[in-house]
Amino acid sequence: MHRLVFVLASLTASLAATGDQAAEDELFVSELVQAAIDRTNHQVRYDGRYLPLDYPGGDVPADIGVCTDVVIRSYRQLGIDLQVLVHEDMSAHFHEYPELWGLSGTDKNIDHRRVPNLQIFFSRN
């Protein structure tokens, strides 16, 4: 659990700001970390199979998931839909994302659930 909190904090702590923005960023990080900690109270079985999802706001069933689903659900608890954000960024900058799956375009069902895609998305944003 400590590693999860560290990873989530690291993803957002790179925001360099001052004054009011710094306070906003600190509050955001605190809320994100709390959302991640809240995820530890859910019984979730590891299941990484491909499933068709609603868009926007799609999610696999609450009792299954993979590591990225913890991140996705933590952000969603704060009103941030990574499915939409990753899909839109990948659509606009597909060539900047890994070519690990032999795809010729985006897939809003799975792109946001892949670690390499999230790494690129967070580094770009």
Image (cartoon, rainbow, N blue to C red):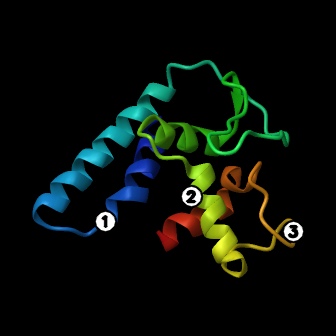
Q: Distance between the residues labelled 2 and 1?
A: 18 Å
Q: Which of marks 1 and 3 is in front?
A: 3
C-beta proximity under 8 Å, tags 2 and 1: no
Residue marked by disc 1: 15
Residue 94: image x %, image y %? 71, 75
What residue appears at the point 51 percent right and 73 percent down from the top-left corner?
124
Q: Is residue 72 above or below residue 15?
A: above
Q: What residue type is labelled 2?
A: Leu
Residue 39: image x %, image y %? 50, 28
Residue marked by disc 3: 103
What residue appears at the point 62 percent right and 40 percent down from the top-left corner?
57
Q: In this view, does 58 lie to the left or right of 21?
A: right
Q: Residue furthest left?
A: 19
Which sits in the foreground, 51 or 65? 51
Q: State the image quarter where residue 111 is shown.
A: bottom right
Disc 1 on helix, strand or loop?
loop
Residue marked by disc 2: 85
Callout 1: 10 Å neighbours few (<14), some, many (20+)? some
What residue appears at the point 51 percent right and 64 percent down from the top-left corner?
122
Q: In this view, does 115 lie above or below 47?
A: below
The first of marks 2 and 3 along the sequence is: 2
Q: What residue type is labelled 1?
A: Leu
The first of marks 2 and 1 along the sequence is: 1
The first of marks 1 and 3 along the sequence is: 1
Q: Which amino acid does label 3 sit on?
A: Leu
Q: How far apart are marks 1 and 3 (CA)?
A: 32 Å
Disc 3 on helix, strand or loop?
loop
Q: How far apart are marks 2 and 3 (CA)?
A: 19 Å
